[in-house]
Amino acid sequence: MNNSEKLYKKLIEYSQGKAYPFHMPGHKRQIMSMEDPYRFDLTEIDGFDNLHEAAGILKVEEERAARLYQSEETHLMVNGSTGGVLAGVAGVTRRGDRVLVVRNCHTSVYHALELNGLKPVFLWPELNEELGIYYGITREMVEKVLEKNSDIRAVIFTSPTYEGIFSDVKGICEAAHQRGIPCIVDEAHGAHLRWCQLPDSVAQGADVVIQSLHKTLPALTQTALIHLNGSIISKERVRRMLGTYQTSSPSYVLMASISQCLEWLEQESAEAFRIYEERVMALRKKLEELKYIQLYTPDELFDWGKLVISTPLPKLTGRQLYDELRDTYHLQMEMVSSKYVLAMTTVGDSPEGLKQLESALDEMDWFYEMDAMAGALIAMDKEDAPEEEEGKKIKTFLVPEQAMNLAEAVNQLKENIPLVESGGRVVGEYIYLYPPGIPMLIPGEVIHVKHIEKMEQYLAQGMEIHGGYDKETESISVLSEMK
């Protein structure tokens, strides 16, 4: 039996199991149906157009997508938002440009910086230290950076975040456009926003918007859209970059899935999203009544379909919540952090699935209360807790020192050394948790003792560090020192 047969059989077995998906893709394995995909897995034969020079049936689909999202120009993508980010950044900038990058961007943004030799000026969002969730960025924050750096050629940021937090896209775009600077928004988690009456980046004035259909809508994994707007950017150049960063043999199965999704948005989405909002809001109301299970609800507008679930009990970690939901209740979460789990709901969720999550969390809350009363999980009394200075609860993470430009650092010789001995060395590879794929350190930055402590904390909590960390040898990639 070869590996592909093993993977196929494992997928079949998993799909027939009990696990309910509170994770991507957004169809939740039940909304759309397709005939045998082998029957229409073809190439660019007569009558079926060419994705890279769409003029026929694929052009019709792109025009339909543009109408639905009210964009000037939209293109289909079959290698996810990653391909759109790479093409968008390359198409809007020139080699060596300085660009404003919000630090909680996905790793694909950093790869785009690396590939194009760009010089990032990082903007760090504020961090909710209680949960470790980044807040959105404001117009004022961006304006301060632009005023100090008149040579910035693009602004790149994510909205909404993995946890559903929005930035002030409209204000940021206005501030950038006043200076003739385009904005690229990674809206991978926002293809559904328009149908939930939530602010989407196309409507807010962004020049390039990249969306993953598969994350929050009924479409197959890897399906995405890129929207191009305004006169600041060269749409022709971005189109050319799409040809560079997308396969020359795009999958017609995936493009058919995009077509199905667009048709569903046209014909069925209004009622489906009304019911979806009603069900999720009812679930949120129930969860907000729990005592030892907490549902994060920001004060500002946010994507209410993202359920960030934590517990105030200090002896329970996000990993323990994640494992209990999966192993005991057969509920597979989207991601786990050190302090919370993320359940992604979408219009594809069934009422039974949402009820299953509600019942599981209600039961867990009852057990936690019993354990707390018995003294096993008693939280620290408020008077015993260390005092915090006002304003210290929410702050930014330690900003690393940059010893070398990213584009230079990735091409340097590297070596692996024990993590515990890496303080003061320059990191050689990206260091990040996945998901969400936001780098803690990028090549060229200095490893501080607090970075080591944070990584050790993640590892102790059962988290996996990806990129330049080798868990077998407990070592980290650093730039080789000159002998």
Image: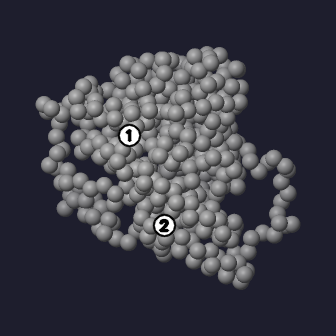
What is the three-letter code of the residue carrying label 1?
Answer: Ala
- Measure the C-alpha gap from mark 2 to mark 1: 26 Å
State the image coordinates of residue 37 (x, y, percent, origin top left): 20, 50
Could you say which quadrant of the image residue 50 lies in?
Answer: top left
Mark number, residue 236: none
Q: Residue at x 22, y 59 (%)?
A: 5
What is the three-letter code of the residue carrying label 2?
Answer: Leu
Q: Is residue 238 visible?
A: yes
State the image coordinates of residue 450 (x, y, percent, origin top left): 69, 47
Could you say which quadrant of the image residue 142 lies in?
Answer: top right
Element assignment for label 1: strand
- Which one is nearer the viewer's eye here, 11 or 237? 237
Earlier in the chain: of badge 2 and badge 1, it is 1
- Quadrant where the N terminus sits is bottom left
Q: Residue at x 69, y 31 (%)?
A: 141
Q: In the rendered image, which residue does mark 2 sit on?
A: 354
Colour scheme shown: one colour
Q: In the rendered image, which residue does mark 1 sit on?
A: 224
Could you say which quadrant of the image residue 342 lies in?
Answer: bottom right
Q: Is residue 67 above or below residue 233?
A: below
Q: Is residue 411 above or below residue 28?
A: above
Q: Nearer the viewer, mark 2 or mark 1?
A: 2
State the image coordinates of residue 399 (x, y, percent, origin top left): 68, 38
Q: Is residue 110 visible?
A: no
Judge from the rendering whether residue 89 lies leftward or rightward of residue 145; answer left or right.
left
- Quadrant where the C terminus sits is top right
Q: Is residue 323 above or below residue 423?
A: below
Q: Contact (CB < 8 A) between labels 2 and 1?
A: no
Give the class, few, some or many, for how many residues have Cα within 10 Å of label 1's Cα (few <14, many ≥20).
many
Q: Residue at x 43, y 30 (%)?
A: 71
State the image coordinates of residue 452 (x, y, percent, origin top left): 64, 48
Give the class, few, some or many, for how many residues have Cα within 10 Å of label 2's Cα (few <14, many ≥20).
some
